[in-house]
Image (spheres, rainbow, N blue to C red):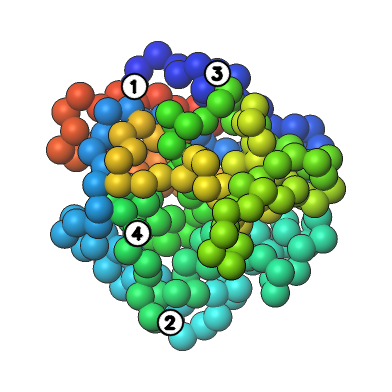
Amino acid sequence: MAELHPALAGATIDDSVLALRPDYRALLIVVTGVRGGPTDDESDAALARAEVSARARLDGAAPESLPEIASWREAFAGFGVKPRQARSSVEALVRRIDAGLPRIDRLTDLYNAVSVAHLVPVGGENLDRYVGPPRLVRAAGDEPFDTVADGEHVVVSADPGEVVWRDDDGVTCRRWNWRQCVRTRLDPSTGNVLFILDGLHPLTDDDLRAAGDAIVEAVTAGSPDAVVSSRLIGAP
């Protein structure tokens, strides 16, 4: 591992978030110099393996029956969000396995595959568009969030009390890990990435690190000059 990246050194979780979920931890990983691009055979195969793994784990049961997903339903309820309003990113993905996980671009596909295989919410941020360190906070309600609605680019605000990831320019992900902003999302040209892995009980620190290792292994394959830096923050 390289020296701690500045984006990781300044990363924080607000006390108000830890008061809501004292078991919360985040594994933050910066990987620079990786190969992006469109979906390829490697990323498609990774998603296919994740689909098989998730079907076996569910064995016909509903996604919310899995304790890793149930924990996120409880966390969302803690700041007033019901399942019909928003679901954790990992539940949203698992619910799509029968129809097939989306193929988006190489890096997004690879981290989505790890998210489903390890049942952990994972976000990927374009580090070159990120401004300042990542912070997980309860929103005041006036933070800007750029998104797409009805095919149009719009800027809205997070709800007061909502748990959000943000940087110096605004909200980068609403409702903990529900929806990412347009500004920092990955695309085929991305080569420098901040990955955020969200952990709640029953996931352990070792589980988070295993998922993180899987992401690093996947995205650095074929990128000999890639540099990796990581930091685990949150509950002791």
Looking at this rendering, what residue extends furthest in the bottom direction?
A: 60
Q: Residue at coordinates 59% horizontally, 67% vertically from top-left?
A: 150
Pick whichever, 185 or 67, lies toward us: 185
Q: Nearer the viewer, mark 2 or mark 4?
A: 4
Q: Residues within 10 Å of mark 3 (few under 14, many from 20)?
A: few
The C terminus appears in which quarter of the rendering? top right
Residue 104 marker: 4
* Left or right: 48, with 93 as reference point: left
Q: CA distance from mark 2 to mark 3?
A: 41 Å
- In this figure, which residue is indicated by the disc labeled 2? 59
Q: Amino acid at mark 2?
A: Asp
Q: CA distance from mark 4 to mark 1?
A: 28 Å
| Of the image marks 4 and 1, the number of the one nearer the N terminus | 1
Circle number at residue 9 = 3
Question: What is the distance, in whole Å, between disc 2 and disc 4 at their CAs?
Answer: 27 Å
Q: Write the residue at 56% across / 26% down.
A: 131
Question: Label 1, label 3: how many angstroms apart (C-alpha)?
Answer: 14 Å
